[in-house]
Image: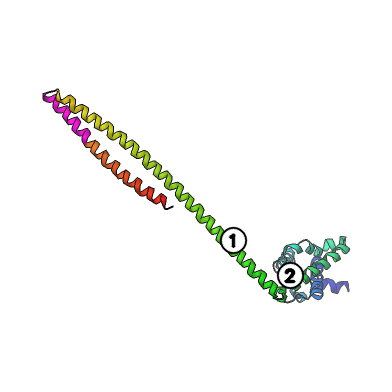
């Protein structure tokens, strides 16, 4: 008998895994849900730790409750079976119970009765959720509008500061041009020509700065109008 058993299961590890998986199949009946539980002919059982790891990996990947069964699957360890068989049996039962519960829960939503109270509750929940989304959208739009307003206010303040600087420059250029013109009236010859040239140059710069200031005034007016509509 021992020779026959060794011929069929050359590895104690594979024999324990074979009997454990077969017992799960017979108890829980998960052939359709877990194809890795299908028994193989003894001659096709792969030997070595790689085959065992692959079998357990396929088992866990196909499990709908993958993570809760990781601890329970340790009951298939032959060393643990030899050391604590009662614990392994208990964990095996828990594992089967987990599979059974998973099978019962799958598709259970179809059995929920659609009562008037349930439909009314769903409609109310949908309305509340839609109202929540609308409020969130309004908050988002309000925040964006506030950012735009702050940016426009800062730009308007920068334009006003630029206008004040240009105004000071224009006044200074005008004063200097008039000063050189007055001095030139009391001079003759080359000195008078130099002073008149300086005065005219300052007046041209004053004219350019005046035009630039008028352009800034126009921009300030447009930005103020835009800010009023924000």
Q: Residue at x 28, y 33 (%)?
A: 171
- Say few, some or many: other residues with alpha carbon within 10 Å of mark 1 (under 14 / 14 to 19 / 20 or more): few
Circle 1 SS class: helix
Q: Residue at x 74, y 63 (%)?
A: 49
Considering depth in this image, is 157 or 95 the residue closer to the camera? 157
Q: Give the magenta range.
A: 187-203
Question: What colour scheme governs how the chains and residues are painted in the rendered image of this protein?
Answer: rainbow
Task: Classify residue 215 by image quadrant.
Answer: top left
Q: Residue 31 location, x and y as percent? A: 74, 76
Considering depth in this image, is 83 or 41 the residue closer to the camera? 83
Q: Which residue is mark 2?
A: 46
Let me know if residue 190 is in the magenta part: yes
**Residue 132 bears which disc, if any?**
1
Q: CA distance from mark 2 to mark 1?
A: 58 Å
* Whether residue 28 is visible: yes
Task: Classify residue 59 by image quadrant.
Answer: bottom right
Q: Chief secondary structure of the magenta span?
A: helix
Labels 2 and 1 touching (C-beta < 8 A): no
Q: Could you tell whether 190 is left or right of 114 in the image? A: left
Let me know if residue 148 is in the magenta part: no
- Say few, some or many: other residues with alpha carbon within 10 Å of mark 2 (under 14 / 14 to 19 / 20 or more): some
Label tally: 2
Classify 152 as above or below 54: above
Q: Residue 84 location, x and y as percent? A: 87, 61
Q: Residue at x 50, y 56 (%)?
A: 141
């Amino acid at each position: 008998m021992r020779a026959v058993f060794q011929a069929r299961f050359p590895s104690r590890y594979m024999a324990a895994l074979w009997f454990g998986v077969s017992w799960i199949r017979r108890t829980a009946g998960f052939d359709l849900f877990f194809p890795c539980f299908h028994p193989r002919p003894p001659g096709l059982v792969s030997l070595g730790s790689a085959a065992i790891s692959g079998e357990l990996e396929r088992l866990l990947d196909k499990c709908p409750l993958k993570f809760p069964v990781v601890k329970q699957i340790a009951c298939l360890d032959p060393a643990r079976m030899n050391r604590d068989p009662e614990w392994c049996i208990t964990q095996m039962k828990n594992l089967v119970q987990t599979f059974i519960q998973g099978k019962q829960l799958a598709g259970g939503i179809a059995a929920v009765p659609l009562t008037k109270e349930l439909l009314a509750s769903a409609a109310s929940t949908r309305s509340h959720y839609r109202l929540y989304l609308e409020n969130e959208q309004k908050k988002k739009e309000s925040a964006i509008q506030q950012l735009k307003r702050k940016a426009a206010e800062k730009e308007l303040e920068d334009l006003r500061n630029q206008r004040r600087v240009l105004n000071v420059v224009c006044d200074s250029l005008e004063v200097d041009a008039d000063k050189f013109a007055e001095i030139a009236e009391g001079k003759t010859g080359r000195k008078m020509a130099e002073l008149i040239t300086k005065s005219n140059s300052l007046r041209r710069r004053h004219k350019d700065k005046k035009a630039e200031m008028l352009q800034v005034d126009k921009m300030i007016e447009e930005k103020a109008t835009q800010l009023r509509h924000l």
